[in-house]
Image (cartoon, helix red, strand yellow):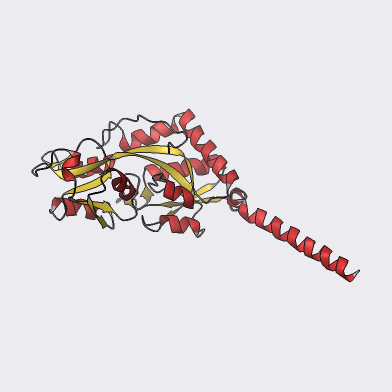
Amino acid sequence: MKSSNKLTAALLGLTLALLAGTARADQLADIKARGTLVCGVLANFEPFGFQDPSSREIVGYDVDYCKGVAKALGVKPVLQVVSMEARIPELLQGRVDVLAAVLGYSPARAEQLAFTHQYYVAKQIIAVKTSGPFKARDDLDGKRVSTIKGSSNIAIMGRVMPSVQLVSYDDSPSAFLAMVQGKVNGFVVSEPIMHRFAAKLGPDTNVAALSPPVGLEYWGLGIKKGEPALLDAVNNALDGMEKTGEAQQIFDTWLGPKTIYQMHRDFKIGSIKG
C-alpha cells in the first residue's frame, strides 16, 4: 500500500512538473497576460534603430515593426536597447521577447534561436574610397576590411572572400571611419548604411560601393526556440502588415525614394530563403 501511494505521488509530481514546464513554455500567453511585448532594438544603427535627436526616443524601421507586431498581438510595445554583440544572449536569457535588431539569417544563428519570416532583405556591399586603387570587389582579396562586431557579414565574408583580413569595430561609424582614415582598405556593410554615410559626407563624397555585392542577407525577427505559438503569431502579424500595405509604408518612411537612401522595395515579407 505504501509503495502504491509513493508511486501515485511520484506520478502526480511528474505530471505537475510537466504541466508547469508547458505553462512556462507558452511565452505568447505570458506576453498577452502582462500586456506588453518587450523588443530588443538597437539605438545606434540608423535608420533601423536609433535615438531621435529631437525627441530622444528610439525610432526606426525595426522599431516600427516591433510596434506593428505588438499591435497585432493586442499588447503594448516596450523597447529594450541591446548591443549588436549582446542581442542574442539578451534574448536567450529572457530579457527580451523578440529581437528587432538587424538580425540577418545564418544557419549558425538558426541553431540558437527561431527566425520569423523575413521583413527586410539587405544587399551587402564593400565600400571604399574612390581615390584608392580598388575598382571591383575582388580587388580586395587579401586586404584589410572593417566590419561590425557580431555582424553576420563576418560569416558572409568568410564564405565569399575568405582571404580578406576582417577587422571588427564596435559600431558602424567606427568601422566606416577606419576605412576613411586608411586603417583598412574597405568596409563591408549593408547597402542603406552605405547610402547614409555617403549622404552625410555630401555631394563631394569620395566613397563608393564596389561591384558585385558580397551577397544578400535576409533579416527576420528573433524569438526563442520552442515557442511555436509565439512564432506563428508573429509571422501572422508580419503577413498582415504586408497585406495591409503597412510594410511598404514603413519601408518608404525610412528607406524610400523621398529619403536620403532613395531605395526601392524589391522584396516582400515571406519565409526566409536559407
Q: How many numbered callouts?
A: 0
Residue 69, x across and y down, in percent: 50, 42
Residue 46 visible within the image: no
Q: Is residue 22 left or right of residue 208?
A: right
Residue 266 percent across, percent down from the top left: 35, 29
Q: Position of residue 54 (x, y in %)?
A: 30, 50
Task: Give the quarter of the image for residue 14.
Answer: bottom right
Classify residue 53 as left or right of residue 133.
right
* Residue at x-position 18% and y-position 54%: 178
User: In front: 32, or 169?
Assistant: 169
Viewer-side residue, 82 vs 267: 267
Query: Residue 95 at what x, y percent from top left?
Result: 49, 59
Residue at the outermost right position: 1
In the image, is 241 to the left or to the right of 200? right
In the image, residue 180 above or below residue 72: below
At 57% from the left and 45% from the top, the residue drawn is 230
Residue drawn 20% across the image and 35% down it? 211
Image quarter (top left, top right, bottom left or bottom right) of the N terminus: bottom right
- In the rendered image, the quadrant that contains the C terminus is top left
**Which is more toward the observer, 184 or 261?**
184
Q: Residue at x 62, y 51 (%)?
A: 26
Q: Quadrant of residue 87?
A: bottom left
The reply to whether residue 160 is visible in this rendering is yes
